[in-house]
Amino acid sequence: MSQASTFLSVSIGCHSQAGIKAINEDAASYSIPEQNSVIHNKGIACALADGVSSAEAGKQASHLAVSRFIEDYFHSPDTWSVAHSGEKVLSATNLSLFKKSHEFASEEKGYLCTFVGLVFKSQTAHFFHVGDSRIYLYRAGELKQLTRDHSAVIGEGKSYLTRALGMDNNLHVDYGKLSIQTGDRFLLTSDGVHDFIDDSQLIKMLTDNIQDEQSLADQLGQQAFDQGSDDNISAIIATVNSIANESLDDFNTKLTRLPFPPPLEPGMKLDGYLVKKELFASSRSQLYLVQDTDTEEILVMKTPSLNFSDDTKYIDRFIQEEWIGKRLYSDKIVTVLHQSRPRTCLYYLMEYLEGIGLDKWIIDNPIPSPKKAIGIVKQIAEGLADFHEKETIHQDIKPANILIDKDLKVKIVDFGSTFVAGTAELFNPLEHEGALGTASYSDPQYLLGKNTGIQGDLYALATISYEIFTGQLPYGDDVEECRSAFDYDRLRYIEANYHNPLIPIWFDRALEKGVQIHPEKRYLNIDEFLTDLTKPNPAFFHDMPEDKEQKGKVFFWYVLSGFWVAMMLLVFFLFKS
């Protein structure tokens, strides 16, 4: 008895047009990976979204939803099921849209869209659905709607969406799956198509039409337009040409049971990677310098610690690190690499960076020039901004997690403590585990069980900025001993100019505000902090001392601040150029 093709094969056509409207607020796209190994591990994906017409940013919402679903799905770990990957991606995207929507809360407009996504993997089709866009299955002459519209009819036949991406901070997405057969045709449509072409017409077009999928998708769009569609018009046609031999359940079982690699020694090989040396080891993980024996490329391999081989939460967290790294695109963040070869053990690969930790750099450069120091701070801030753009909080920014090369280029590393908004049911406070220096840079609120989000990373950035300019910590070493809110309240900020007399008062006040123990007294975002670091804030000079001696000191700082203003502006323009 002959077997099916070794690899899954699907042909896809995609059509999207504005129709009679001035702007196309729909988005539709798909991805068929070039490498069979990626198709084997992740499958083939397509997605369609319809921006809500009453929302101010429906177009932006639909394009963001489609692009992130496809990109982030293929960046998700191979060990995650399709359902788990889709849920993670859509939850993070939904929260991002919800937050953007609230920027327009006063106008009751925002980032809203409907969404349908379809992933083919092995012998199964997985579908995700929010709103009133639809997915149909055409098989053996019959058409079946796989999704149920999330809408309600309220008076005079008018329908209203009851669910959409970006509508609520908690996403309720419909998920389903079914076994696929060779010859199956799936149809994804926006309401600009299915509201104007009835099922009998769809069946006729799908039955009689033997042309390629792109031509058929274009014909569906034209048919909807000719029949009076008054909305944007989008459709995706996907035809299953062949299915994989291995069942999806068997394949997923293999992935989720990947063993932990043994301790690696120089000269050993693992999946085509030659171990050169161990770079780092702790009770939780190991880093090895490895070389790809095919390309001779030097890489870094991170492996989990055997201490946690039976800890499912640890394993899930380790796997999630890879996904977090893959979905962040930034020249200020270490790159997590896609692997073309199958893995026999649990690990992931990163680019190799030549340089030293910022902690060592600070020791070697106790009083750096303002140009160098502010340049480093700006790069760290840019990297954090790229984290935050993807609704991701690093939570463990410290000098040891920042690499700096000989050209003073900075990259943030380590995703072990990151928090992705929208993907976690509960906030897990950072565990310090006695790691030297970690508690000195982590937001005190973490230890108290509170998630301050961006403000937590900002606290760490301000602390690092203080240390770069002074070589010391803003609260001294006592912060390492704090275990309660009472302990933190006893801390007293040490003025930066105590350690470095050249630091002007306005610069010191910006640092002090950045490291406030209580979040309500801190900056709300990184941009505000950087502005006050590079330009004197007049508010910092309002509280003036009364006695003559103190007034004299303040006058001295005014004069010195004038010099700093000119110097910092010069540094800014030089750095920008």
Image: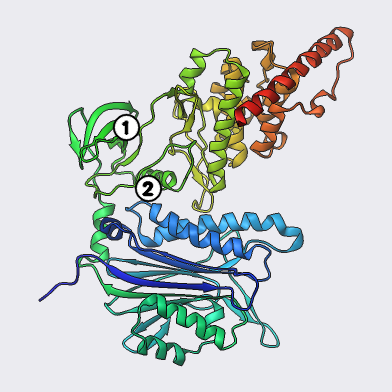
Looking at numbered disc 2 in the image, what kind of residue is underneath it?
Answer: Asp
The reply to whether residue 195 is in sight is no
Residue at the far left in the pictured view: 1
The residue labelled by disc 1 is 286
Q: Residues within 10 Å of mark 1 (few under 14, many from 20)?
A: some
The vertical placement of 563 against 539, above or below, is above
- Give the left or right position of residue 96, taking residue 285 as reference: right
Looking at numbered disc 1 in the image, what kind of residue is underneath it?
Answer: Gln
The circle on residue 72 is none
x, y percentage for residue 35? 28, 56
x, y percentage for residue 306? 27, 36
Residue occupying image coordinates x 63% and y 30% = 485
The vertical placement of 82 against 362, above or below, is below
The residue labelled by disc 2 is 316
- Counting labels gives 2
In the image, 565 versus 362, the foreground residue is 565
Q: Are the residues tagged 1 and 2 within 8 Å (C-beta)?
A: no
